[in-house]
């Protein structure tokens, strides 16, 4: 049987970033304007005033210090509070395809491959720029790749679910060499006017090359095993969809963007993920002592500290469970891949690790890898 391996990864990082201080100044200006505009209703108890946000709270509650975005100006404009991204002509590539292409080229370069050698492109992300034609097919065309391409969405777990799909297709013979691309424009789907979540997300794109281990040209991580699981929860939700116009409710409704019950997510996802990783290690015959590194989904530092401790049975040592969320914030499906891409070069042959993402659905995906 063909054994799949990860032979390249790439990260596209947007040019603009926003610090917590900058974000809070913009939010507080927006809140002041809102409160002034609704002073009478607030005094009458009909409208809730908007309290100020705090950079100290954000750092302490999440570990996030900065986030990269595709457009800073629109996000920080108190009269707008959304990125401003130009619509694309029908004959121009989508923004997501361009971000994904940059990450894909870096991943291909690391693998020593050309675009024409790819015969499967999966665009695995939380949101897609349009229903069709697929972003993945645009990337396939821009790279000169063959075979087939498709978009898929499992929210924050999209990349690991995509890696499982690609690895299974390579094992089964329906694809030879795959790219799993995760462009995330979270800024377009975040409610920047909501103090509870305005600090959570950032934009980025990642790409992973997966091919038969015995064809790898350079260093590789063998994909030893993958496992995906879902369990229904409406605690992370987004009600926007193609049926929105037929509801005759086109106003700016809060539930048309990312919503979550953060406390519940925190409490419920921790045991789910810890048990998932433990069960996956167990069925592969690996023990916690075999794990050199955990590349976790990047949502919250305290959450990752807890999962690392639970999985390893002790507090992770420096570098064993690298976080990138302080610089990137939560980049949805891309987070664990950025952590892997930036913190895996130093593993020696035979050393093992787990890439694990988790999020809305709920969903959790883990990939056991071994440096060859
Ligand atoms: N500034 C100051 N105070 C604040 C702020 C703020 N910005 N926000 C909240 N507070 C206040 C609250 O009002 C509350 O006050 P009080 O105690 O008086 O009621 C207090 O601070 C505590 O609030 P919380 O309980 O909400 O704070 P937490 O400590 O729970 O921290 C977190 C909030 C950081 C959100 C935390 O709950 C968390 O990280 N939860 C898990 C989140 C998570 O992992 N989510 C994953 C979802 S992502 C996903 O699956 C992909 C979705 C697709 C991406 C779409 C792109 C947009």
Image (cartoon, helix red, strand yellow):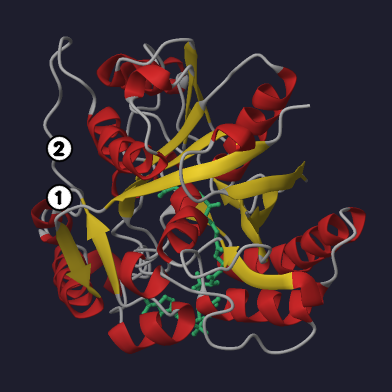
258 in relation to 33, above or below:
above
Q: Position of residue 308 (x, y in %)?
A: 67, 77
| Secondary structure found at label 1 | loop
Q: Nearer the viewer, residue 326 or 120?
A: 120
Q: Quadrant of the C terminus?
A: bottom right
Residue 58: tell me if it is visible: yes
| Secondary structure found at label 2 | loop
User: In the figure, is residue 75 to the left or right of 144?
Assistant: left
Marks 1,2: beta carbons within 8 A:
yes
Query: In which image quadrant can residue 274 be found?
Result: bottom right
Query: In which image quadrant can residue 324 be found?
Result: bottom left
Q: Residue at x 13, y 42 (%)?
A: 84
| Label 1 CB sits under 8 Å from any ligand 1 atom | no
Q: Position of residue 216 (x, y in %)?
A: 52, 38
Query: In which image quadrant can residue 181 be found?
Result: top left
Q: Nearer the viewer, residue 291 or 78?
A: 291
Q: Position of residue 129 (x, y in %)?
A: 33, 27
Q: Nearer the viewer, residue 68 or 360?
A: 68
Q: Position of residue 44 (x, y in %)?
A: 32, 70
């Amino acid at each position: 049987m063909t054994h799949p391996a990860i032979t390249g990864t790439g990260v596209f990082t947007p040019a603009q970033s926003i610090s917590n201080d900058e974000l809070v100044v913009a939010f507080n200006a927006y809140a002041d304007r809102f409160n002034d505009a609704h002073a009478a209703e607030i005094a009458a108890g009909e409208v809730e005033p908007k309290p100020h946000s705090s950079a100290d709270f954000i750092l302490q509650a999440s570990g996030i210090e900065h986030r990269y975005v595709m457009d800073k100006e629109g996000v920080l404009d108190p009269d707008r509070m959304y990125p401003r991204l130009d619509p694309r002509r029908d004959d121009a590539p989508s923004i997501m395809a361009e971000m994904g292409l940059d990450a894909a080229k870096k991943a291909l370069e690391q693998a020593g491959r050309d675009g024409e050698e790819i015969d499967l492109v999966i665009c695995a992300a939380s949101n897609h720029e349009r229903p069709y034609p697929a972003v993945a097919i645009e990337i396939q065309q821009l790279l000169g790749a063959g075979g087939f391409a498709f978009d898929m969405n499992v929210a924050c777990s999209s990349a690991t679910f995509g890696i499982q799909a690609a690895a299974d297709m390579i094992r089964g013979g329906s694809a030879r060499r795959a790219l799993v691309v995760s462009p995330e424009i979270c800024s377009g789907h975040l409610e920047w006017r909501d103090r509870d979540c305005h600090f959570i997300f950032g934009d980025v794109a990642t790409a992973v090359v997966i091919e038969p281990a015995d064809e790898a040209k350079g260093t590789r991580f063998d994909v030893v095993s993958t496992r995906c699981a879902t369990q229904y929860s409406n605690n992370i939700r987004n009600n926007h969809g193609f049926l929105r116009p037929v509801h005759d409710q086109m106003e700016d409704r809060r539930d048309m963007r990312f919503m979550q019950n953060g406390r519940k997510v925190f409490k419920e996802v921790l045991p789910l993920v810890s048990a998932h990783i433990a069960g996956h290690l167990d069925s592969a015959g690996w023990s916690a002592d075999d794990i050199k590194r955990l590349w976790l989904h990047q949502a919250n530092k305290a959450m990752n500290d807890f999962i690392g401790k639970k999985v390893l049975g002790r507090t992770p040592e420096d570098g064993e469970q690298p976080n990138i969320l302080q610089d990137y914030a939560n980049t949805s499906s891309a987070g664990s891949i950025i952590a892997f891409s930036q913190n895996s070069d130093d593993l020696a042959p035979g050393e093992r690790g787990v890439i694990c993402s988790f999020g809305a659905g709920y969903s959790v995906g883990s990939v056991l890898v071994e440096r060859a």
